[in-house]
Structure formats: structure tokens, C-alpha cells
Amino acid sequence: MTTTPVLDLGADPEQDEIRRAGLRRMRTLAVSLLLLAAAVYLLTLGEDGFLGFVNAGAEASMVGAIADWFAVTALFKHPMGIPVPHTALVPKRKEELGRSLEDFVGANFLQESVIRDRIALARVSERFGHWLVEPENSKRVVDEVASVLQAGLSRVRDEDMGALVRDAVLPRFREEPISPVAGSLLEEIVRDRAHHGLVDLALEEAHRWLLANEETFVEVVGERAPWWSPQALNERVTHRLHVEAVAWLADIRHDPYHHARTALDSMLEQLAEDLLHDPETQERAERLKERVLDHPQVVITATSMWNAFRGALLSALADEEGPLRHRGVLELTRFGTRLVTEPRLREKLDGHAADLAVFAVSRYGDELTAVITHTVDRWDGKEAARRIELYVGRDLQFIRINGTIVGGLVGVLIHTVAVLVD
């Protein structure tokens, strides 16, 4: 057996009690005016002159009060429990009410012009800038973001990262030809001479290592000497090779136009050209890519690198007084200052916010307004009527009060016309 779910608006019981008391007071006032009109009518019944006007006004007041009581009551229930047609409208027609509300919201609130006007009037970026300028607010944002990042990073498991690399990253690398990318990148690097800094660093480190590890160099080179070569000759040759290697590296370091440097540039230029246009080189590059990607160590290495990065990031995020959080607060404060002082930036961000809101509404507006219909459809009719009356019934009692007063005035006016005609 199924039951209709009871309407749950998440109401505050204390606020509901306040609304209920206000509704009772207004009902009492409306009923009191009706009773007063009835008493005046009975006391002045059959009188002429001034009391005749009072009697006519009281009679009309009763009619207006009773008519408006019927109209207000008919919205939520049958008046006096009598099933008069077209009464208890909310319980009976709540589905139509939901659809009407859905259409009303969609037609009047979720329109592009309305959304853009509201965002422009709200001055979102300016207010956000004034809020961010305060360091404690920027720190709050950084702390919240750090907490979310820590929670998210802590939940990423090694097997999940391995599966991501194996099932998503590596297949994508296999599908994408490496030669055009590598060739274009290398061509750009060589053209801008961006690799010269790396070459200088490598030469510097190699020269330093040779100077500090002469014995190791001699030992390694000496192992390649023929077995029949005399030891003394081997030592002289290896030491001489060490001296020449050090001198050669020093020459390359200090001469930016050394033939070794130009030879390296020419080789890289040719490699970039071959990667872009030579089918044989492209095929070798693809085979090399496949061998690297097929090696099981790739997934292990990627996971290890991720763990190292995650550990360092978690440590930095956990340090509330650390440089990462301090930098985040500083950058947010500066950004807030820019929002306050740069109208063009605010206009640009407000435009982006409006575009995003319009996109969201155009894409999901129907789903948003459909929530109204779906929610109303789940309501129990009688409970929905009681809850809606609790929220708006107090104001609706003014209809009864106004009907009593206006009815009395109209009754006096009609009686005046009748007297004048007679």
C-alpha cells in the first residue's frame, strides 16, 4: 500500500508558530468586523434617515465580508465543508499550479536579458573585489581551497593513478603521432636558441665533474686500454686525455661560436626537419615511442612521480603558515585590489559571469524550472493547502477586511443614490 508523501518545506517550527499566530489575529479581526457589521445591521433594521444609511452600509459590509471570506476560503478548502464547485482550488489543482509556476519562472526570470541585467546591477566582481581586499577573507578562501585539495588528493590511490595512466594517458599518446609535435617543438626551440641555456648548464656541470673526478675518469678510460699496453703508457695517455677533455670543454664554455656548438645546432635543426618531413625518421620516432610506452616501467615511474608531487603538495598545503598558503593569500589580495581599481577588468569578469549564467540557463533552464513541477506533484494536496495558507493566509485576510470596509462604503453610496432617486 502506498501513501502520498507529506509536504516537507524544511520549515522552522518557531517561524511557523509566529505565522500561525499572525494568521489567527487577522482572522479574528476579519470575523470581528463581520460580527460588528451584523450587529449594526440588526440594531438599525427598519430605521430611516441617518440610521438608514448606517443600516445600508452594514448590510453591504456583511455581503462583502461573506463574499470575500468565501473567495479566500475557496482557495484552500471547501467553505464550511460543503463541496461547492470550483472550491478547494489548491488541493485539487496543485499540478496545474506547479506547471503555471514553472512557466512563470521560465518566462519572467530565466531570460537572457533579465539575467544580464541582474548580474550587471549586482556588481558581482566589484563586491567580490572589496571582499577579497581584506586579508582575512583571502586567507579564508585559501584555507577552504587547501582543505578541499587535501581531501581530494588524499583520496587518490596509487592504483587509480596507475589505471588513469594505463587506460587513458598511454592510449592517447599511442594515437597521437609524436613526430609532428616533437619536430615543431624542436624547430621552435632551435630557432629561438632556447636550448643554449641547457647546453651551458651541461657544459658547466661536465667541466666541474671532470675537474673534481680525474681519478675516476682515468680509471674508466684505462679499463678500455688493450691488455698488452704498458701500465705507464696507459696512465700517461689517460691523464693526457683528461687534460684535453677539460681544455676542450672549457673552450666550448667560453666560446659561444665554437664549432661544436654550431655543429649541435645544425644537428638539431636537421633532426627537427627530418621529424617534420622525412618518413623514415618519423617511422623510427614512432617505433621508439611505442617501445617506451610498452615498457612496464612507464606506469610505475608515472605513479612514483605523482606520489612525489602529491606528497610535496600535501605537505605545503598542510602548513598553515607556509609559503604556499602565504603566496595564495597575497595573490588573492592583489587580485581583489585589481578588481576594485580596474573597471575594465570588472567589466570583463562580469561579462564572463553573465555569459556563464546565460549558458547554464539555456542548457539547464528547463531542468531547473521542472523542479517546481516535480516538487509540487509530490505534495499531498491538503497538506500543501495548509502550508501555503500558513505562509500567505495572513495577507489574504486583508481581502476580507477590505471587502467589509469597501462593501459598507458602496452600500452607503447605493443607498444615497436610491434616496436621491426617490
Image (tube, rainbow, N blue to C red):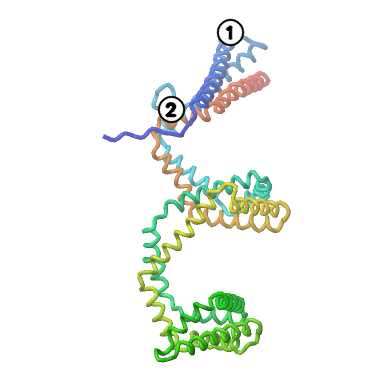
Q: Amino acid at mark 2?
A: Lys
- Which secondary structure, mark 2? loop
> What is the quadrant of residue 338 in the picture?
bottom right
Near mark 2 (Cα within 10 A), the count class, few <14, some 14-19 or many ≥20, is many
Query: Is 126 rendered above or below residue 170?
Result: above
Residue 394: x percent and y percent?
Answer: 55, 26
Query: Is 32 rendered above or below residue 191?
Result: above
Residue 360: x percent and y percent?
Answer: 52, 54
The Cα atoms of the two marked residues, 1 and 2, are separated by 33 Å
Give the left or right position of residue 364, taking residue 139 as reference. left
Q: Amino acid at mark 1?
A: Leu
Per the rendering, the mark at residue 43 is: 1
- Which secondary structure, mark 1? helix
Q: Residue at position x 59%, y 86% from top?
A: 248
Q: Residue at position x 54%, y 78% from top?
A: 214
Q: Earlier in the sequence, mark 1 or mark 2?
A: 1
- Residue at the outermost right position: 341
- Residue at the outermost bottom position: 228
Residue nearest the observer in this picture, 313 or 73:
313
* Number of numbered discs overlaid on the protein picture: 2
Per the rendering, the mark at residue 77 is: 2
Q: Quadrant of the N terminus?
A: top left
- From the viewer's perspective, is the residue at label 1 or at label 2 nearer? 2
Near mark 1 (Cα within 10 A), the count class, few <14, some 14-19 or many ≥20, is few
Q: Residue at position x 42%, y 21% from top?
A: 80
Residue 263: x percent and y percent?
Answer: 57, 89
Residue nearest the observer in this picture, 50 or 345:
345
The answer to the question of whether label 1 and label 2 lie on touching residues, with beta carbons closer than 8 A, is: no
Q: Quadrant of the C terminus?
A: top right
Query: Is 244 rendered above or below residue 310?
Result: below
Residue 400: x percent and y percent?
Answer: 56, 24
